[in-house]
Image: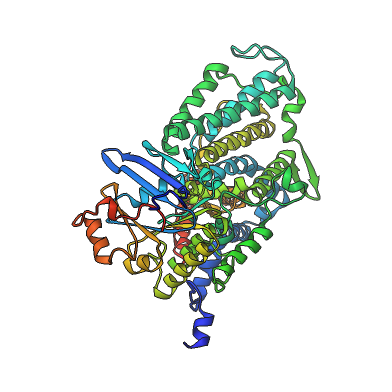
Amino acid sequence: MSSSISENRALGEGFVPKRTRLQWVQVTLHKYPWISALIVLILVVAGFGLVNERFLLPSTISLMVQQTVIVGTLALAQSLIILTAGIDLSIGSIMIFGQMVMANIAVFATASNVLPIAGGNPYLAIGLGILAATAIGGINGLIIVRFNLPPFIVTLGTWSVFMGFSLILFKSRIIQGLEMPEVMTLLGEGFSVGPFVFTFGLLVMVFLFFAVSWALRNTAWGIHVYAVGDDPVAARLSGINTKRVILSVYLVAGLIMGIAAYITIGRIGSASPNVDPMLNLQSITAVVIGGISLFGGRGAVVGALLGAMIVTAVEMGLSLAGVDQAYRTASIGMLVIIAVGVDQWIRKVKV
Amino acid sequence: MDSKGEGMTEPIIKGRGLIKRFGSVTGLNGTDFDVYPGEVLAIIGDNGAGKSTLIKCFAGAHSPDEGTIWVNGAEVKFGSTQEARKNGIETVFQTLAVSPALDIAANMFLGREIRTKNLLGSILRRLDHKEMRRLAAEHLQNLGISTLQDIRQPVETLSGGQRQAVSVARAAAFGSKVIVLDEPTAALGVRESGKVLELVRDLKKSGITVVLISHNMPQVFEVADRIHVQRLGRRAAVITPGSASMNDAVAIMTGALDLPESEQQLTPI
């Protein structure tokens, strides 16, 4: 037997084909999907900067970064869920519920609702608000896991149900910042770094991204989240409790949304049940643009942050360029379609 | 069978009257099963006979609707693959059960990840990626697979044979008592199949029991001690490569031949 052939070849050896440059790009983007988001962000900022130099002013950039904070935090929660091949359409409602609980417990005067807990204690308020949001997120998870229903459909329903909770319990009263202790609007406060102005809310968001990224890459839970989204059957056969993982993801997402609620009160200066209805879709857009696959199991959460920044940058850029609101909305939609298209192309990698 | 009862060993896994239904389809219709410690038992049968369903019951992937399973003489009810593994039973499923987007090391330790030995490991439960990669590479080396470029490759970039190798290596690495292989050579070529058969022999030499499902008669007759023939959800017969021919085996599989129990090999040789 020819020694060189049989010794060098062992079970299942493959050969490495030559790659064209385009294929090399495809493979790299496959390994690190968020790189495409980073490239797009740089292109967008550079592009708009060329069109209108006011775009690159520190004040504009600061504003842009601050605008990203709410969508970014929600996108973080959404990306966790999407990694398990799920989706959460009720994100905005959960955050609103969290806000309402927080604000109504923190008001000095009587709460506008049935709960007699108002008393102006901000720490209790924040804590209970985050807890409430986590619990509500858990309800999504419980329904999905217990009854084996598709997340899209469950959260489509809970979107309205949770909104209903908020309105029933807290009516439609907007609680102004002045009615609550100062701590409630703390995350809206900022500090300057040179000519740039950043808020504490931004710091919280960045911290959350670091924490979740770390957990996803360095804990067994993180690996299981990816495994469940990638191939739930293989995950189950490998001994992973897929139901527990999915439930945990919705709970953590709820927790993040509770924190987002606190950030929003700080940013807007009041607690209102009328938050932008586009927030849900914007969070999903950010996740998809960030290279996280809607089919689950692939992508890094940092992509969601980049995606949120791209959405804000495009919005701001177009608005500064004087483009009409209608065209701005359409262009974000086109961005999503292009992002999904690129995602599909990247997935076709053959080694 | 030893008439005086001397040298009668207990089966390491025993099943009696196993019934498993899927809606209106009956997968297992009262299957009996015995595999003795240290032997290589092959399971053969036509499509739909219930081979995969049977081993999934021991693997913890299915719960039989009726019937009992004993492992080492103790009755067990496996609710998950983890429980089967705790009993030393490792399974390589037909679908391989690997996660395509995760890398080789992650798949090797899926469900039993290793944590770092420091404070970060115990409190924050930080994973020891370096150790897992090192061990994964070692296990693959033991199987003779040294040509995978990077242990960090996502499994989906591997060929079918390489994926099968990873799956088999995983079972061989953790299997302490019984290793079950469901069609392990289905995706492999001749030389690679040979390596798997070599592995089966090596496992037997180290005292591990091997249960092997295969459609490949020559391989089965080459490596098995006893052959369990599954037909229509029940155990039709147990034969040995010495006592029956491949034609007999196929005849029993298809129902053309009915073997009386006295001519079967229900206990170890």
Compared with A210, A98 (above or below) is above
Q: Nearer the viewer, residue A175 or B227?
A: B227
Q: Position of residue A247 (x, y in %)?
A: 53, 36
In the picture, residue A103 is in which quadrant? top right
Q: Residue at x 54, y 57 (%)?
A: B102
Task: Describe the colour scheme in one phrase.
Answer: rainbow
For the view shown, which residue lies furthest in the left direction?
B256
Specify whether residue B159 is in view: no
Q: Nearer the viewer, residue B265 or A253?
A: B265
Compared across the picture, whether B88 is left or right of B115 comes to left
Compared with A32, B76 (above or below) is above
Q: Nearer the viewer, residue A206 or B236?
A: B236
Q: Residue at x 66, y 24 (%)?
A: A128
Q: Position of residue A70 (x, y in %)?
A: 62, 39
Specify whether residue A60 is in view: yes
In the picture, residue A259 is in which quadrant? top right
Q: Position of residue A125 (x, y in %)?
A: 69, 23
For the view shown, which residue lies furthest in the bottom direction?
A2
Q: Residue at x 74, y 51 (%)?
A: B117
Q: Nearer the viewer, residue A142 or A43?
A: A142
Q: Position of residue A343 (x, y in %)?
A: 48, 58
Q: How many marks?
A: 0
Quarter placement of the C terminus of chain B: bottom left
Compared across the picture, whether A101 is left or right of B16 comes to right
